[in-house]
Image (cartoon, rainbow, N blue to C red):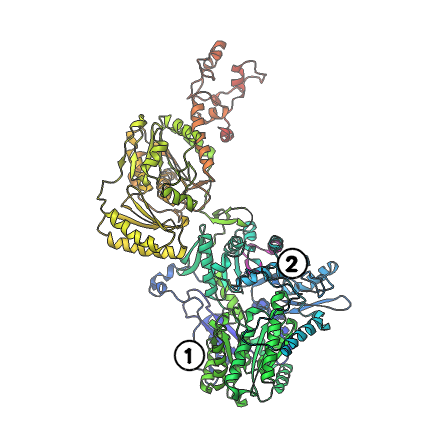
Amino acid sequence: GGETYIISCVLGLTTIPPDIEHIRVRSIPKAEQLTTMHKTDSRSSISTPSRSNSSNQASALPTINQIPGRKQNFKKVGFVPSSPYNQGNKARTSQIKPAVHLNSTDGLVVASAFLPVHLHRSNDGNWTADWDYEMLLSMQTHLRVTRIGVVKWRGWHGNQGKSGSPEAGVPMDEREKVEACLRPFNCVPVWVEPALFGDMYNGFCKGVLWPVLHNVTSVYTSSQEGQQETHVNETDNMDSEISGLATALNQATTESPSHGQFSEYSMDDITRGPIHGGVRNEAALWSAYTQVNKLFADKIIQYFNEGDLVWIHGFHFMILPSILTRRIPVAKIGIFLHTPFPSSEIFRTVWCREALLRGMINADQVGFHLYEYARHFLTCCRRLLGLNYGMIPDSSGGHNLAIDVNGRHVAVTSIHAGVEPPVLNQFLSHSGTMMEAATFRDQFQGKVIFCAIDRLESLKGVPLKMLAFERFLSRSPQWVGRIVLVQIGVSAYERGDDYQRTKREVVAMAAKVNRLWPGSIHFRECPESKMRLQQRMPVLRASDVLMVTPIRDGLNLNPLEFTIAHQDALTTAGQRDGRKRGLCILSEFSSCSRVMRGALHVNPWKVDEIAEAFNQVLIMSEDERIRRIRCASEFVTRVTTQRWALAVMLDLKGVSKNMDFARYSGAGWGLDYHLVGMDAGYSSLDSACVTKAYKSSRSRLILVDYGGTIVSNDNLDNLQRFQMVKKSRAPTRPTDQLVKTLIDLCGDKRNVVFVISGKEKHSLTRTLSKIPNLGLAAEHGMFISWPTQKASKRRWETLVPNIDKSWRPIAINIMEVYTSRTHGSYIEETEMKVLWQYRDADPEFGSLQAKELEDHLSSVLRDYDLDILNGGREEGGYVEVRPKGVNKGVVALHLIKTYPKFAQNKIDFMVAIGDDHTDEPMLSVTRQIGRRIEASRRAREGEEALPPVPATMTIVDVSSCDSYVSPELRAFTCTVGKKPSSAANYLNDVDEVHELLSNFVKIASRDSKFYSSADLSSIITTQSTLPMNALLPLPNTVMNKNLETISSGVPRSMSLGTISMENEEKKVSGSLQEFLLNTVEDDDNEEAFSF
C-alpha cells in the first residue's frame, strides 16, 4: 500500500533525538489518482510536528516496525551528526542559537533547466499540463514555492536539421496561454530562443561540461559523422556476419520512420551533435551559456521577494549565483549539482574553469549528493582559486564544512536524494502496471531476469557489462537458457558520435552472444519518452535483478525504485512466488552505491568481478538475500525526496548571512564579481575627512607599509618573489614623485613619519635612507632607524635585545630536508629570521609539509625564545622562525610611547596604512587606540556607545598608550585593496595612497600661502569679534609681495564669518574690503572642497 512520513527534528539541536516515523496509509488503487497528491493543500504536504503529535499519530496506525522480520529498534536519522563539543557541553545549550525551522511563510524560488511538468496541446489550441513525477522538483511542500525553468515543446532545442523538429518551441502567440496553464502549478516559464537554448544545453552543457564533470577529457577530436567505427575487444574477431548485422541494424534505426517522430509527452527530439573536442567554437557556446543564465536571473529577480530562498539546480547554471549576487546580494542562494564533480586535474582542462568556480562560490551553499563530489569541488577551489576550507563554527554551536571566500563562508552540503515511496506504490498498485509486469515475465518464463536500463553512451559501461555476461556464460554453462539479460537502451541523441559508437558496440556484442547462446540477451532501444516512470515500474517489478554498472555516474534513482518495487519480498506473502528477486548489482562509481549498502558492489572496469556478481546472485542463500534487501530498504524508506529537500533547505536557511547590505561589498568585473564580507561601516577612505583632520592637528604620527602600499607589491608574482630571494632581480623602487612627497611630509615639524616594512635593512637603506627625518623599521620592526636630520649618518637599533643566533643553522638544516622533498619550496634568509616558502609547491602537499615542519621546529627549538609562524596562505604560504615578540603591532605601540622624544605635544592625529596580513597587527593597534579615545569621549558627552569590536580585529591591551595620545585624537586605519581587514577603511591601490599623501603635502604648503573660503570657514573661532579697522589696510599693503595674499590685517585665528552686516544695504562691492564684508560666509558644506 501507500506510505507517508512524519519528519521530526531533521536538523539542529533539539531536546529529543532525531527521528522519523514511517506510517502505513490506505493505498489509492488507480494511477490517475496521483493528481490528488498535487492538488492537496500545500501546507499539509510536509510538516514538522511536535513529539506528542507524532506519537499520537503513530499509535493510531501500524508502523513499519510491524513488518515481519523487521527489528523494532530501527535506526535513528540524523543528517548532521552531533558534535562531541555539543555532547560534552550541555551547560552551553542555553547560549546556542535556536534550531532553524521552515514554515508556510518561507518563500522558495527554485530554478532548473526544465519545469517539472508535461505540456499537452489539443487540436483546437487548448493547453493542459500535469506533473512530471520523475523530476525531483515535482514534489509538493508547505513552503511558498515558485518554480522557474524552460518548458519542453517541439523544437525547444532549436535543432531543425534532417532529423530535427519542424517546430521551434511554443509559438509566440500562444505563450500567454501556456503561462496561464502553468500558473496553478506555481511554475513560471523562461522564454529562450530555441537556437540559443540549444547551443547552451546541447552545445556547452552536454558537449563541454558533461564529459568533464564525469572525469572524461577528449584530447583528440571525435570521429566525423558517418565513419563506421566499432570499438570492440580486439581479441574478439567479429566475423562479417556480425559486422553486417550491426551495420544493418544501425541503418535500420537511422532510416526508421519512427526515428524522426517526436513524443509530445517529453519532447526529447534531439538530433545528433558534436561532443567535447570536436566543435572548436567555444566562444559562441560560452556566450550562449552566459546569455541563458542572465535570462534566468532576470526571471528569478522578477519573482523574488525579500527573505525568499533561492535554490538553483544543475550544472546548467553554475554562473547564475554570480549574476544574482550582484543584483540581490542579501538573498540566500543555494546551488545543487546532480552530477559528479571531477578531480582538479580534470576540471582544470576547461578554459572557463575560474569563472565556473567563482560562480558557484558566489552562492551561500553548494550541494552535492556525495561527499566524494564535494571533496573534489573543495580541492578545485583550493588548487585553482587558492581558497581555504574546513570545519567552521556556526552560530548554532556546531561546525559546518565551508569555504572561506573573502570574509564569507560558503557552506558545502552533501546529502543524497531519495524517492517518494507513496508515488511508486501507487504506480505498483495500479492494475495496468501489474498486467504489464506479468506480460513482461511471460516473455521469459522460467528464467531469472537480469534487467538494465541505461542511456546509450560510453559512460554507462554497457559494453563492459555484456562482456562480463559473456564471460559468465562461458564459465558457467549450466546457467545457459535459465537466465536472460534484458538490456534497454535509452537513445542519447545529444551525445552525437558517442551515442552512435556505443549503439554499434552494444548491437554487435548482443548479436555475438546470441549467436553463441541464443536468447541470452534481449536488447531493445527506445526514446526517453518511452521509458518514463509509468513504463519503467512494470519492467522493474517483473525483473529479478537490476544491474547499474556505469563507469561514472551521478544521480541514478533506478536502484531505489527497484528496491521499492520488491519491498514485498520481505513479507511472507511476497516470498511465496519462489523468485530470487530484489537484489541490485551496482557499480562503485555510481552515487547510490554509497547509500545502497545491501547491493552487490562491483568495479565495472573489472570484467571478472561483474561475472562473479552474476554467479553470486544466483547461488546466494535466502537469508543473505533477505538481509541485503532489508538493508537497502532501510535507506529508501527513510530518506525520501521530501526529506532530502527539507534537509538541504534547512541548511540553506541556517546559513549565517547578514541582511544588512552594508556588511557586503562587491568587487570585480563581469563574471569575476564577488561579494566581500565586511564589517559594518567598512568603506572607502574619505580623503576629505582625513585631510581636514590632518590640517587641524598639530602633532601627527603617520605609519605606512612599504611593498604593496607605497610601492608595487613584488610578492604577488611567485616568479618575481623567487627571483628577489635569489637576488636575480632588482626590487621595485619608489618613484621620484613619491620620494619628493615623503621629503615634504618629513619636512613638516608637526609630522613623524615611519615606513614599517618586512624587507631587510639594506633594502630600505638603498631606497629611502637619504630622506631626512624619515623613520624606518625593517623586518617587521626588528630593526628601527629613528628620524634624523642627517640621513647620511643613519643608525639602526633592534626592537628586542640582541639574542643568541645559534638557532639559525639548526632551523636552516631542518628546512633543507623539507625543501629537498617538497618540489617548489625554497628557503629565504634575512638577518633576523628564516622562512620556508612553499608558494610554488602543490597547495595541499605544501600545506601538509608546512604543518609537519612547524611541529618539527617547535620541538627542536623549544628552548629558544622564538616565534614559529605558519601563515601567509593567501600568498602561497610559508613557515617563519623569528625572535619572539616582534610584529608591526608591537612596533606601533613602541613608536607611540617613544613619540615624546620627537614632539612636545601629545598625538592628536594618527594614520596607519598597510596592504597584507603582516600589517594587520599595526592596523588593529591603531584602530583600537582610536576606538578607546572615541569611546571615552562618547561616555563623557553621554552619546551612544560604539558598536562591538569587529571579528576581524585581534584584541590588544592599548591602555599603556593613554598618556601619549590626546583626548582629541583622530585615528585612521586603511588597507590597500577591498578585502576583509582590521582597518576601518580601504584604498583601492597604491596610486590612491600616493594621492592621499600628496594631499597632506598640498594642504600643508597652502596653509602658509593663502586661504580659500573653505579654509576660512574651517578655522572658525567662536565668540570672536573682528574690529572694523582691522579690515581697512592700505591698498599698497595688499600689493606688497612680501606680505601674504590675504589681507595682513586679518589674524589667522579670527573668523570672518562672525561679521554681521544686517544693517547695511546690499550693494555691489567696490573694493576688497567691501567684498569681504559682504560675501564671506561660514559654510560648512564647502569643507569637501578644501583641496
Farthest residue to the right: give it.
Answer: 124
Q: Amino acid at mark 2?
A: Phe
The verdict on residue 601 being magenta is: no
SS at badge 1:
loop
In the figure, is residue 128 to the left or right of 778? right
Q: Position of residue 417 (x, y in %)?
A: 52, 69
Give the alpha-carbon distance from disc 1 to disc 2, as whole Å. Answer: 51 Å
Q: Amino acid at mark 1?
A: Asn
Highlighted range, magenta:
292-316
Q: Quadrant of the N terminus?
A: bottom right
Question: Would you say residue 24 is visible in this rendering?
Answer: no
Q: Position of residue 1048 (x, y in %)?
A: 44, 15
Query: What count of labels does the image hold?
Result: 2
Marks 1 and 2 in Cβ contact (< 8 Å): no
Mark 1 Cα-neighbour bin, 10 Å: few <14, some 14–19, many ≥20:
few
Q: Position of residue 7 (x, y in %)?
A: 49, 71
Q: Position of residue 448 (x, y in %)?
A: 55, 85
**Residue 1065 lies in quadrant:** top right
Mark 2 Cα-neighbour bin, 10 Å: few <14, some 14–19, many ≥20:
many
Which label sits on residue 974?
none
Above or below 164: residue 284: above
Foreground pick, 864 / 637: 864
Mark toward the viewer: 1 or 2: 2
SS at badge 2:
helix
Residue at the image point whose x is 50% and y is 31% from the top:
1088
Above or below 793: residue 197: below
Residue matched to label 2: 197
Residue matched to label 1: 73
Above or below 660: residue 39: below
Say which label, 1 or 2, has the lower sequence index. Answer: 1
